[in-house]
Structure formats: C-alpha cells, structure tokens
Image (cartoon, helix red, strand yellow):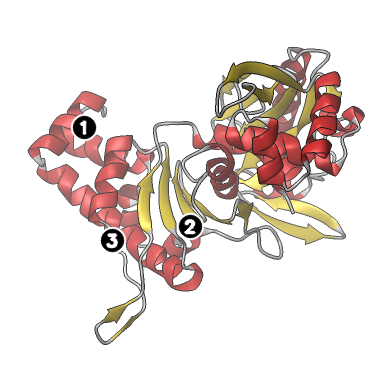
Amino acid sequence: MKNIELAELIPSHIAVLREIHRQGSATRVDLAESTGLSPQSLTRLTKELLNKGLIVEGERRQKQRGQPAIFLSIKPSKLISIGLVIEHDAITCTAKELGGEQLVFLKKQGNFEQAAFAIEQVNLMLNAVIAQCPDDAYGLGIGVSIPGFFDKQNEVWRLICWLDTEGWKQVNLDTFLDASATFPVYIENDGRSAAIGQAVEGVGRNVGSFFQLLMTKGIGGGFVKQGKLLRGSNGNAGEFGFFSTNSDPETIQYYQPTTECLDHYLQEKWGKPLATADLNKALHEQEPHLQHWLNRAVSHIEPGLNAIIALLDPQAIILAGRLPLVIRQELSKRVRLSGVTYGQYRAPLPQIIVAPEQDSLILGASTLPVARYFYAE
C-alpha cells in the first residue's frame, strides 16, 4: 500500500472524489452541479481519475431523454483508511475501503494500560494490517482513537491518558507509530473521534450540527458542525465527562450511562450476569431496579446536555456507544432537554438521535483520515 500523495491528486480531483464518496455514486452532471466545476472540467478530471484507477464507471441509467447517464463510483480496495483503537483491555486495528467494505479486522484482548507495552502491541498489529492491504492501493492515513486529552510540552504534543498518565506523557505522538514515516497519522480522543465518524459515515451525515454523547467505559463527547469537528485550541473540546467529575462515588460506580455501570448494578440486584433477553424482559415489565437505574442515569447526564444546548445550540444530540441500543432508546425517551425561555417563548430544542448498534470507536478511528483528507477546510 502506498501513500495517497503518490497519486498526485490536485484539489479538483479531491473535490470530485469527495462528492462521489458523499453521494455513493454520481454522474458527471451530478458532479458538475455539486462541485460547481464546468462539464468540460468534469470530463477531463473524471478521465484522469479513471486512468489513475481510483474510480470506475458503473451502470447506465435513463434519467432523462437522450443518452443514459453513466454513474461513477470509487474503485473497490483502491483508497484505504486505517483505524486504530487503543483501550485499557483491547487494541483493535482495521483497514477499510473509502465508502466501502472493511478489508482487515484485527483485535487483541489483554491488559494494555501501560504505554510501552501498548505501543509495542499496536505497532505489531498495525504492521500486520498494512501488510494485508493490496499493494496497488493508496492509504489515506491512520486514525487513532484513545482516551485522554492533549497538552503541548516543549513544542511536542503529548497525551494525558488515564490508562498510564506518566507513561503516555513521555510518548512523542508524532513518532510512536512505525508507520508514521510512511502514512499521515491523525490522533483524537475517543469521544471526538467517534463524533467525526458519525458525521462522515454515520447517522450524523445529513445533520447540520450535532453533539454526540459517547457511552463506552466512560462518557465522552464531540461537537460537529457542517461536517467539521470542533477541536478547540488544544484539541480537547467536547469533554462531556467533565460534567460528572464531581459526582458522588455511588453514582460513578453504579449510575453512569455505561455498560460497565449497568452490568455492575443489575448483577448485584439480579444475582446473575446481564443478558439481552433479561434486559428486554425487564424493560417490557418495567422491572423496578432497571427503572431506578434509568432514572438515575438520566439525572446524571441531563445537566451536561442542557449546558451543551445552551452553549452550542446543536441541531441534534446523538446517543452512541456500547450501552445497549434498547437502553439508549429508553434514555432518549426520558431525558428532558431545556433551552432558553423568555415568558411564553422557548428556543427550539435539538432532536435526539439514537445511533444504531455499532462499534463507534472503530467507526471514528477509521473515519479520521477520510475526514482530514476529503472534508477538512
């Protein structure tokens, strides 16, 4: 696999590829309308992209009178994005086609809290994934999702990560991946990474602005407007977990809206591991312990969500993460959003969107290179 820079693409090439990716497939007329380029320019540009082997001509469809329109799409296995997720108990690495299939998926379970050991395993896995990608493919880059926040020390960006704070503080984020000598690397906190994943490839794709609340082992978030991630001055915007740092120990242990807290609480109350069938039955029967947990979890996130609404005025709130879909759906029904009011007048409130069952962290990591290459300003 080669660096995308070797494809020698100009901005107009990138604009055409971006629109084909956005639309799934498009005719030259569609592309002229969406890019603002002239039909003559589109003819030349698409011919160059066909010659480079980056796009292919597909079926002909009769859209109007005259010759059938030819639809163009991204050539399979030609433009590839690498996604890397580092967690305390697992490392996952994937290679995915632009707008297409997942080509490679590797996951290793274990204890990866120590930075040195995690980085060693990450590089082994990353090199294995790259080796399995087609030789003639172009790599858009490597997206990395990891918990923590960023700090610039001695002109070098460092990660402040709760997994191993002192260990990660010593890591140069520009060079810790062997593959960084060949491919660009884009690193984001897990919450922000997952948010841009929804904006480019997920349920936030057609939403003007949204805040995504990510519920994994902890609580994270990210704000996206017009497909662009709000990163802040240091890349630390969207830290929703800040709103829960002063919660009492009982709430942190049992009532945060995470799978771990839900499992912990219900195992103590039910005396057995949590199963999907039990969860669905309990919801249907309005089982008291689960109802209590849902109400406490909602009260835990409502103040933060309403602060986000007041400060950022998003069009939507997206609830995503590992917390079971049925639980996130139930939370969406119970949370009470509020905005600015003057007398009888109330400011519009965002809609709540529940993301489907998916690995939001993998979606985010593999989307980071796509977002930076095709959608960055």
Q: Residue 95 sits in which quadrant? A: top right
Q: CA distance from mark 1 to mark 3?
A: 21 Å
Q: Residue furthest front?
A: 65
Q: Amino acid at mark 3?
A: Ser
Q: Residue at x 18, y 28 (%)?
A: 278
Q: Residue at x 29, y 53 (%)?
A: 297
Q: Is residue 339 left or right of residue 80?
A: left
Residue 226: % across, % down: 59, 55
**Numbered label attached to residue 1:** none
- First reached walking from the N terminus: tag 2 or tag 1: 2
Disc 1 marks which residue?
279
Work out whether 138 lies above or below 161: above
Disc 3 marks which residue?
299
Disc 2 marks which residue?
241
Q: Amino acid at mark 1?
A: Leu
Q: Residue at x 83, y 15 (%)?
A: 136
Q: Residue furthest left?
A: 285
Tag 3, which secondary structure?
Answer: helix
Q: Residue 263 sits in which quadrant? A: top left
Q: Amino acid at mark 2?
A: Gly
Residue 189: % across, % down: 62, 48
Residue 347: % across, % down: 36, 74
Q: Residue 1 sits in which quadrant? A: top right
- Which quarter of the rendered picture does the C terminus lie within? bottom right
